[in-house]
Image (spheres, grey):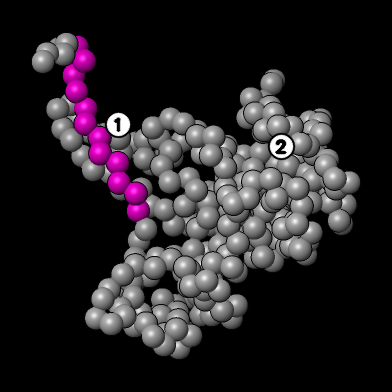
Amino acid sequence: MQDLNRDAVRQRLEALGFTVHPIVETVDSRQPDLIARADGATMYVEVKTRVEDHVLRAKMEAVRVGETAEILTGLDKRNSLSTEIKHASTQLSAAAARDDLRLLWYRADRGPFVQGALDQIGATLYGMRMVLVESASRQEPRHCAYAGYADFHRFQEIDGAMVEVDGLITLLLNPFSPRKVAFTASRIARVVHPSVFDVERAGEEGTLLIADGQAPRHSDVEMLKHLGSKYPTFKFLRFLQHCAGTVMTTIDGSQGVSN
Protein backbone atom coordinates (compact mmCIF):
# COMPACT_ATOMS: atom_id res chain seq x y z
CA MET A 1 0.00 0.00 0.00
CA GLN A 2 1.29 3.44 -0.89
CA ASP A 3 2.25 5.49 2.17
CA LEU A 4 1.18 9.05 1.35
CA ASN A 5 3.01 10.52 4.32
CA ARG A 6 6.25 8.81 3.37
CA ASP A 7 5.86 10.02 -0.20
CA ALA A 8 5.18 13.57 1.01
CA VAL A 9 8.36 13.57 3.11
CA ARG A 10 10.30 12.08 0.22
CA GLN A 11 9.17 14.91 -2.05
CA ARG A 12 10.00 17.48 0.60
CA LEU A 13 13.52 16.11 1.03
CA GLU A 14 14.08 15.99 -2.71
CA ALA A 15 13.06 19.65 -2.92
CA LEU A 16 15.69 20.36 -0.26
CA GLY A 17 18.40 18.82 -2.41
CA PHE A 18 18.52 15.21 -1.20
CA THR A 19 18.56 12.05 -3.27
CA VAL A 20 15.91 9.92 -1.58
CA HIS A 21 14.90 6.27 -1.86
CA PRO A 22 12.20 4.40 0.06
CA ILE A 23 13.28 1.40 2.12
CA VAL A 24 11.43 -1.85 1.54
CA GLU A 25 9.37 -2.79 4.60
CA THR A 26 10.24 -6.00 6.42
CA VAL A 27 7.84 -8.35 8.16
CA ASP A 28 8.74 -7.07 11.63
CA SER A 29 8.81 -3.40 10.48
CA ARG A 30 12.26 -2.86 11.98
CA GLN A 31 13.36 -0.60 9.14
CA PRO A 32 12.97 3.17 8.73
CA ASP A 33 11.01 4.60 5.80
CA LEU A 34 13.59 6.50 3.74
CA ILE A 35 17.28 6.82 3.03
CA ALA A 36 18.43 10.28 1.95
CA ARG A 37 21.85 11.33 0.68
CA ALA A 38 23.43 14.73 0.12
CA ASP A 39 26.89 16.27 0.40
CA GLY A 40 28.48 12.87 0.91
CA ALA A 41 26.39 12.07 4.00
CA THR A 42 23.72 9.41 4.48
CA MET A 43 20.60 10.05 6.56
CA TYR A 44 17.91 7.58 7.52
CA VAL A 45 14.41 8.92 8.05
CA GLU A 46 11.47 7.45 9.95
CA VAL A 47 8.08 9.05 9.26
CA LYS A 48 5.35 9.21 11.91
CA THR A 49 1.93 10.84 11.70
CA ARG A 50 -0.26 12.50 14.30
CA VAL A 51 -3.66 11.51 12.87
CA GLU A 52 -5.93 12.37 15.76
CA ASP A 53 -6.11 12.81 19.50
CA HIS A 54 -8.70 10.24 20.57
CA VAL A 55 -9.37 11.99 23.88
CA LEU A 56 -9.93 15.34 22.16
CA ARG A 57 -12.24 13.77 19.59
CA ALA A 58 -14.32 12.06 22.27
CA LYS A 59 -14.72 15.33 24.17
CA MET A 60 -15.69 17.23 21.01
CA GLU A 61 -18.23 14.61 19.97
CA ALA A 62 -19.73 14.67 23.47
CA VAL A 63 -20.85 18.30 23.09
CA ARG A 64 -24.63 18.18 22.76
CA VAL A 65 -26.60 19.94 20.03
CA GLY A 66 -27.05 23.60 20.77
CA GLU A 67 -24.25 23.75 23.32
CA THR A 68 -20.85 25.45 23.24
CA ALA A 69 -17.93 24.03 25.24
CA GLU A 70 -14.29 24.99 25.72
CA ILE A 71 -12.14 21.86 25.59
CA LEU A 72 -8.61 21.85 26.97
CA THR A 73 -5.89 19.72 25.39
CA GLY A 74 -2.79 19.00 27.44
CA LEU A 75 0.48 19.95 25.75
CA ASP A 76 2.78 18.22 28.22
CA LYS A 77 4.68 14.95 27.68
CA ARG A 78 2.59 12.16 26.13
CA ASN A 79 3.19 8.47 26.85
CA SER A 80 1.71 7.54 23.47
CA LEU A 81 4.34 9.72 21.79
CA SER A 82 7.07 8.10 23.87
CA THR A 83 6.02 4.70 22.55
CA GLU A 84 6.25 5.96 18.95
CA ILE A 85 9.63 7.60 19.59
CA LYS A 86 11.01 4.41 21.10
CA HIS A 87 9.84 2.46 18.05
CA ALA A 88 11.40 5.03 15.71
CA SER A 89 14.72 4.80 17.55
CA THR A 90 14.73 1.04 17.11
CA GLN A 91 13.94 1.32 13.41
CA LEU A 92 16.61 3.93 12.74
CA SER A 93 19.27 2.05 14.69
CA ALA A 94 18.50 -1.18 12.83
CA ALA A 95 19.49 0.30 9.48
CA ALA A 96 22.06 3.04 10.14
CA ALA A 97 25.80 2.65 10.45
CA ARG A 98 27.64 4.45 13.26
CA ASP A 99 28.20 7.71 11.38
CA ASP A 100 24.91 7.76 9.46
CA LEU A 101 22.49 10.48 10.50
CA ARG A 102 19.04 9.56 11.86
CA LEU A 103 15.97 11.80 11.58
CA LEU A 104 12.48 11.30 12.99
CA TRP A 105 9.93 13.19 10.87
CA TYR A 106 6.50 13.87 12.36
CA ARG A 107 3.64 15.00 10.13
CA ALA A 108 0.61 16.43 11.93
CA ASP A 109 -2.82 15.85 10.41
CA ARG A 110 -4.72 18.93 9.24
CA GLY A 111 -8.00 17.72 10.74
CA PRO A 112 -9.80 19.17 13.78
CA PHE A 113 -8.77 16.39 16.16
CA VAL A 114 -5.09 17.32 16.50
CA GLN A 115 -4.07 20.31 18.62
CA GLY A 116 -0.63 21.51 19.67
CA ALA A 117 1.36 18.77 17.95
CA LEU A 118 4.63 20.75 18.01
CA ASP A 119 4.28 21.54 21.72
CA GLN A 120 3.38 17.94 22.62
CA ILE A 121 6.26 16.46 20.65
CA GLY A 122 8.71 19.05 21.98
CA ALA A 123 7.58 18.47 25.57
CA THR A 124 8.02 14.72 25.16
CA LEU A 125 11.46 14.94 23.57
CA TYR A 126 12.87 17.61 25.91
CA GLY A 127 10.96 16.81 29.12
CA MET A 128 9.50 20.31 28.85
CA ARG A 129 7.20 21.62 31.60
CA MET A 130 5.62 24.98 32.36
CA VAL A 131 6.54 26.56 35.68
CA LEU A 132 5.16 29.69 37.34
CA VAL A 133 7.89 32.05 38.54
CA GLU A 134 7.96 35.38 40.31
CA SER A 135 10.51 38.10 39.71
CA ALA A 136 10.33 41.72 40.89
CA SER A 137 6.77 41.11 42.17
CA ARG A 138 5.67 39.97 38.70
CA GLN A 139 4.48 36.44 38.02
CA GLU A 140 4.84 34.72 34.66
CA PRO A 141 4.84 31.18 33.25
CA ARG A 142 8.15 29.96 31.82
CA HIS A 143 9.10 26.85 29.89
CA CYS A 144 11.64 24.60 31.57
CA ALA A 145 13.48 21.87 29.67
CA TYR A 146 14.35 18.61 31.46
CA ALA A 147 11.97 19.39 34.33
CA GLY A 148 10.44 16.09 33.23
CA TYR A 149 11.97 12.98 31.69
CA ALA A 150 13.26 13.69 28.17
CA ASP A 151 12.95 11.13 25.39
CA PHE A 152 15.90 12.68 23.55
CA HIS A 153 17.99 11.58 26.54
CA ARG A 154 16.43 8.10 26.55
CA PHE A 155 16.83 7.60 22.80
CA GLN A 156 20.14 9.21 21.91
CA GLU A 157 20.36 7.43 18.56
CA ILE A 158 17.83 9.92 17.16
CA ASP A 159 19.81 12.96 15.98
CA GLY A 160 16.83 15.23 15.50
CA ALA A 161 13.09 15.40 14.98
CA MET A 162 11.37 17.34 12.21
CA VAL A 163 7.85 18.42 13.11
CA GLU A 164 5.66 19.38 10.15
CA VAL A 165 2.34 21.10 10.86
CA ASP A 166 0.28 22.33 7.90
CA GLY A 167 3.41 22.48 5.75
CA LEU A 168 5.50 24.45 8.27
CA ILE A 169 8.54 22.58 9.54
CA THR A 170 10.58 22.89 12.73
CA LEU A 171 13.73 20.86 13.34
CA LEU A 172 14.38 19.90 16.97
CA LEU A 173 18.03 19.04 17.67
CA ASN A 174 18.98 16.27 20.09
CA PRO A 175 21.76 17.58 22.35
CA PHE A 176 22.51 14.03 23.58
CA SER A 177 23.20 12.56 20.14
CA PRO A 178 26.74 11.22 19.60
CA ARG A 179 26.52 12.82 16.14
CA LYS A 180 25.32 16.21 17.46
CA VAL A 181 28.09 18.24 15.83
CA ALA A 182 27.79 16.48 12.47
CA PHE A 183 23.98 16.68 12.44
CA THR A 184 23.94 20.38 13.37
CA ALA A 185 26.29 21.09 10.46
CA SER A 186 24.49 18.75 8.03
CA ARG A 187 22.47 19.78 5.02
CA ILE A 188 19.08 19.21 6.66
CA ALA A 189 19.91 21.63 9.49
CA ARG A 190 21.38 24.21 7.11
CA VAL A 191 18.55 24.30 4.59
CA VAL A 192 15.72 24.63 7.15
CA HIS A 193 17.49 27.36 9.15
CA PRO A 194 16.22 29.42 10.97
CA SER A 195 13.45 26.91 11.73
CA VAL A 196 15.84 24.96 13.96
CA PHE A 197 15.41 24.69 17.72
CA ASP A 198 18.60 24.27 19.75
CA VAL A 199 17.67 23.80 23.42
CA GLU A 200 21.20 24.57 24.61
CA ARG A 201 21.29 27.87 22.75
CA ALA A 202 17.84 28.79 24.06
CA GLY A 203 19.11 28.19 27.59
CA GLU A 204 22.19 30.34 27.01
CA GLU A 205 20.04 33.14 25.59
CA GLY A 206 17.70 33.03 28.58
CA THR A 207 14.56 32.28 26.58
CA LEU A 208 14.25 28.90 28.30
CA LEU A 209 14.98 27.53 31.76
CA ILE A 210 16.92 24.27 31.94
CA ALA A 211 17.04 21.78 34.82
CA ASP A 212 20.42 20.15 35.40
CA GLY A 213 21.14 16.54 34.49
CA GLN A 214 20.86 15.14 38.02
CA ALA A 215 17.84 17.27 38.98
CA PRO A 216 15.24 15.51 41.20
CA ARG A 217 12.54 14.76 38.62
CA HIS A 218 10.74 12.39 40.99
CA SER A 219 9.45 15.29 43.10
CA ASP A 220 7.93 18.62 42.05
CA VAL A 221 8.83 20.12 45.44
CA GLU A 222 12.47 19.12 45.13
CA MET A 223 12.58 20.19 41.48
CA LEU A 224 11.33 23.67 42.40
CA LYS A 225 14.06 23.91 45.05
CA HIS A 226 16.65 22.81 42.49
CA LEU A 227 15.53 25.45 40.00
CA GLY A 228 15.46 28.10 42.72
CA SER A 229 19.11 27.40 43.58
CA LYS A 230 20.11 27.49 39.91
CA TYR A 231 18.14 30.64 39.08
CA PRO A 232 18.21 32.73 42.28
CA THR A 233 16.65 35.80 40.62
CA PHE A 234 13.37 33.87 40.33
CA LYS A 235 11.02 32.56 42.97
CA PHE A 236 9.63 29.25 41.70
CA LEU A 237 5.99 28.90 42.75
CA ARG A 238 4.55 25.78 41.12
CA PHE A 239 4.34 23.76 37.94
CA LEU A 240 1.43 24.46 35.60
CA GLN A 241 -0.40 22.23 33.17
CA HIS A 242 0.32 23.50 29.68
CA CYS A 243 -2.90 23.44 27.66
CA ALA A 244 -4.46 24.60 24.40
CA GLY A 245 -8.12 25.52 24.27
CA THR A 246 -10.64 24.53 21.59
CA VAL A 247 -14.11 26.10 21.46
CA MET A 248 -16.68 23.63 20.14
CA THR A 249 -20.24 24.52 19.12
CA THR A 250 -22.62 21.84 17.89
CA ILE A 251 -25.57 22.79 15.68
CA ASP A 252 -28.44 20.72 14.34
CA GLY A 253 -27.89 20.65 10.59
CA SER A 254 -31.23 18.96 10.01
CA GLN A 255 -33.04 22.20 10.90
CA GLY A 256 -31.34 24.21 8.19
CA VAL A 257 -29.57 27.54 8.65
CA SER A 258 -31.28 30.92 8.89
CA ASN A 259 -29.82 34.42 9.00
Which region shows up in magenta? 243-254
Q: Residue placed at 52% from the left, 71% from the top?
A: 205
Few, some or many residues within 10 Å of mark 2 (<14, 14–19, 20+): some
Which residue type does callout 1 highlight?
A: Glu
Compared with 168, 138 (above or below) is below
The amino acid at mark 2 is Leu
Secondary-structure class at tag 2: loop
Magenta stretch: includes residue 249: yes
What residue does disc 2 label? Answer: 16
Q: Is residue 226 above or below residue 34?
A: below
Which residue does the image show at 64% across and 46% down from the upper left? Answer: 192
Note whether residue 196 is visible.
yes
Q: Secondary structure at mark 1?
A: helix
**For mark 1, what is the residue?**
61
Please determine whether, in this image, residue 148 is positioned above or below residue 118. Answer: below
Where residue 47 sits, quadrant-wise, is: top right
